[in-house]
Amino acid sequence: MSDVIAAIATANVLSAIGIIRLSGDGAAEVAGRVFKPNSGKNLGDLPPGKMTLGKVYDVTGAVIDECLCFHSKAPNSYTGEDTAEIQCHGSPAVLAAALEALFNAGARQALAGEFTKRAFLNGRMDLTQAEAVIDLISAETAEAARNAAGQLAGVMGRKIDSIYDSLTNIMAHFHAVLDYPDEDIEDFRLQDFEHTLQEAYSELDALYKSYDRGRMIKSGVTCAIVGRPNAGKSSLLNALLGYDRAIVTEIAGTTRDTITESVRVGGVLLRIADTAGLRATDDPVEKAGVERAFKAADGAQLALAVFDGSVPEADEDTIRAAATAKKAIAVVNKSDLPLMLNVDELKTHFDHVCIVSAAENKGLDSLDKAVAELFDDGGIVYDGGIVTNERHAEAVRRAADAIAYSLDSMYAAVTPDAVLVDVEAAMEALAEITGRLVSEDVTGRIFERFCVGK
């Protein structure tokens, strides 16, 4: 038996449609105390899945909306339980009043992610599918959305299950021979499973390596804009964003703190940090900003090193800061002024040099092209088979390591029972991904990041 939970499943903004969801034993009965079909019938007596027109009432019994409602019977629902859904006009006030009436009728407020958690616990989806729900909701790129949709459809779970099942076959054969020595079972020879173990390792290794790309499409590329004061860093940020986010003046040192924004450049989602100008200063505030600029560049996946093209010398601090990032592009700004900078010298430090005028929005297409080339995905198909989840990546890594250890042990002629300890460890790691083996604490942490109503 499960209690009835209810929550508003749409955003708390004015909209055409607002949705309230219920799930649990007797969901239709609880919804029927608040929603009355115009036909005069009880909601629970209507066929499951059929939309019906009616009125919804508040706690005083007053009509607050004319809307639609339907119910579903377990196990044929999202959660695997009895469910109901009221589709009102999208007034936050109407939705709040209807939700209050449902609480008064016996429902309780759903916790964040509780609908999807119940779907997982009731076997309607594995943990990779459940986690894909929030990834799909929060997707910021088409690639991330496609991959999350594929995972929601079960692509990742099937990949993991296939590897898990191949390892299960090895363990089952070994224990069958061990436990039933008098039965006519083919002898267990570990060498017969060498190809299976090698194939499992190759698949796990490929999955783990996909995490770099998966993390990029899900979270974006960390990017630091670095350069001397008045080189045009803030102007470049504003040009990329398409609006004035950062203050731009002729006074050196205007930007003293790090400003972070997200923007797509060359089809790549960049998490851009506009930093303070790199120069020696006695101003303690500006000095702290310069230190933050070097820190932002250090380890960033991309540095946009901005140089003032109207001056003859390339700034060494900018070159040094950009070199600490994993990848870097030189952006020679102020192309609207006579070019004084030796661009050929910059090419000795950077593979990509783009000449732009941030103030006049010129040359930014060259920057688009450079970013696209640096982060080219090689035609990857985002079908749900790319690892985007840190928890999954860590478990895949452990599973791959365990299979590698088992192969090393086998080649060293270690006894089968000792080799299979590592195979079992790999299975346990894989079971954590799909939820075959996962603690209640881990489950709780996973669903904490969900929104209420999903």
Image (spheres, grey):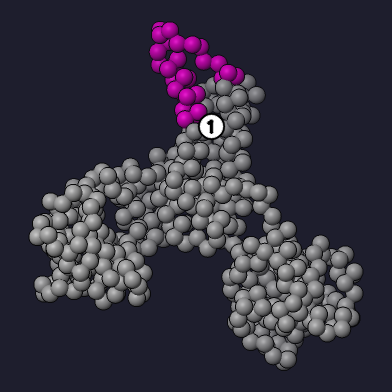
Q: Residue at x 62, y 78 (%)?
A: 242
Residue 56 placement: quadrant? bottom left
- Residue 99 location, x and y as percent? 22, 68
Per the image, the residue denoted by label 1 is: 422
Query: In which image quadrant can residue 373 be found?
Result: bottom right
Q: Residues within 10 Å of mark 1 (few under 14, many from 20)?
A: many
Q: State the residue lying farthest toward the front.
A: 39
Q: Nearer the viewer, residue 40 or 86?
A: 40
Query: Which amino acid type is shown beneath numbered disc 1?
Result: Asp
Query: At x 80% / y 83%, what residue is drawn?
Result: 336
Q: Is residue 31 above or below residue 319?
A: above
Left or right, 439 with respect to 59, comes to: right
Q: Quadrant of the C terminus?
A: bottom left
Q: Residue 13: x percent and y percent?
A: 36, 74
Q: How many marks?
A: 1
The residue lying at 24 percent from left, 51 percent from top is 49
55 left or right of 442 in image = left
Asked if the magenta segment contains residue 185, the reply would be yes
Residue 420, image x and y in percent?
A: 52, 27
Residue plotted at (17% across, 67% down) = 55
**Is residue 88 visible in the rendered structure shown here?**
yes
The answer to whether residue 390 shows anywhere in this view is no
For residue 254, above or below residue 174: below
Q: Main secondary structure of the magenta part?
A: helix
Could you tell me residue 232's position as x and y percent?
73, 81
- Residue 60, above or below 324: below
Q: Is residue 454 magenta?
A: no
Position of 116 compared to 224: left or right? left
**Closest to the observer: 414 or 98?**
98
Taking depth in this image into account, of 35 and 438 the one nearest to the observer is 35
From which residue to which does the magenta span run? Answer: 165-192
What SS does tag 1 mark? helix
